[in-house]
Amino acid sequence: EAQVTQNPRYLITVTGKKLTVTCSQNMNHEYMSWYRQDPGLGLRQIYYSMNVEVTDKGDVPEGYKVSRKEKRNFPLILESPSPNQTSLYFCASSFRDSYNEQFFGPGTRLTVL
Amino acid sequence: GENVEQHPSTLSVQEGDSAVIKCTYSDSASNYFPWYKQELGKRPQLIIDIRSNVGEKKDQRIAVTLNKTAKHFSLHITETQPEDSAVYFCAAADSGGYNKLIFGAGTRLAVHP
């Protein structure tokens, strides 16, 4: 089954404790991205990747890191989480670029205390 | 960079009525405009998209229109049904080779039986 998976689905952590949210897709998609969803603000792109070892900043990259060492995986790293990073995070992938259908993962609800 | 504004933020209609959601964008070079539907607690899913070489696209009860001169595009849902109740997001693909996808803030549509 074609899908995008994220782990964990829910996470409660404390300020400053490094965490990683994993994202994996099995559709051989080149383009992957991370979004955060906050009430009244819609989906805001954090980082995106056009292919292995090619990543770039989205609109709200501050406080986040990503890597793309393999085509299927695109982890999101919060090295020192802060309460303003409490949000619902979605990973997405698409064929080739942002001009094609984005397939979203199930979401990760993160709470930073 | 691109900026997308979406209106209204909430919309309430009676079953069988039509619903219209409008988005404006700032970058005249943007050329791809998707619409995503997010049901409560679920991930966003693409429902329809349009590219800048097309003025209108229809898929059963859903249609999207694009006015490049005015830099706005709209989602039209006819004969609304309770299962159309969801949050709808418009988006525009940032041009200039950056491959960003910029979303509007979302419209919560409620269809009352």
Image (tube, helix red, strand yellow):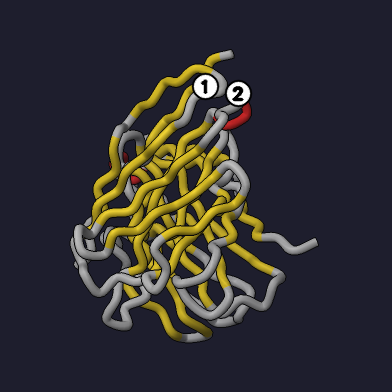
Residue occupying the point 38% across, 35% down:
B107
Q: Which amino acid type is shown beneath numbered disc 2?
A: Pro
Count of numbered badges drawn on the protein: 2
User: Are the residues under marks 1 and 2 on the same chain?
Assistant: yes
Label 2: how many residues lie within 10 Å, few (<14), some (14-19) or many (20+)? some
Q: Identify the residue at image location x=32%, y=83%.
A: B97
* Image quadrant containing the C terminus of chain A: top left
Residue at image position (45%, 20%) is: B13
Residue lying farthest top? B113
Picture layout, residue A103 above or below residue B78: below
Q: Position of residue B81 (x, y in %)?
A: 60, 26
In-image side of B94 versus B108 (left or right): left
Q: Is residue B74 left or right of residue B68?
A: right
Give whichever of A90, A19 is nearer the camera.
A90
Residue corresponding to mark 1:
B111
Label located before the other in sequence (1 or 2): 2
Eyeballing the image, is B21 above or below B79? below
**Residue closer to the observer: A83 or A68:** A68
Q: Which residue ends up furthest to the right in the rendered image? A: A1
Observer-nearest residue: B31 or A65? B31
- Under mark 1, the amino acid is Val
Q: CA distance from mark 1 to mark 2?
A: 5 Å
Instruction: Give residue B56's quadrant in the image.
Output: bottom left
The subunit letter for the residue under badge 2 reads B
Q: What residue sits 37% from the left and 39% below the top?
A: B21
> Which residue is denoted by mark 2 in the rendering?
B82
Q: Residues within 10 Å of mark 1 (few under 14, many from 20)?
A: many
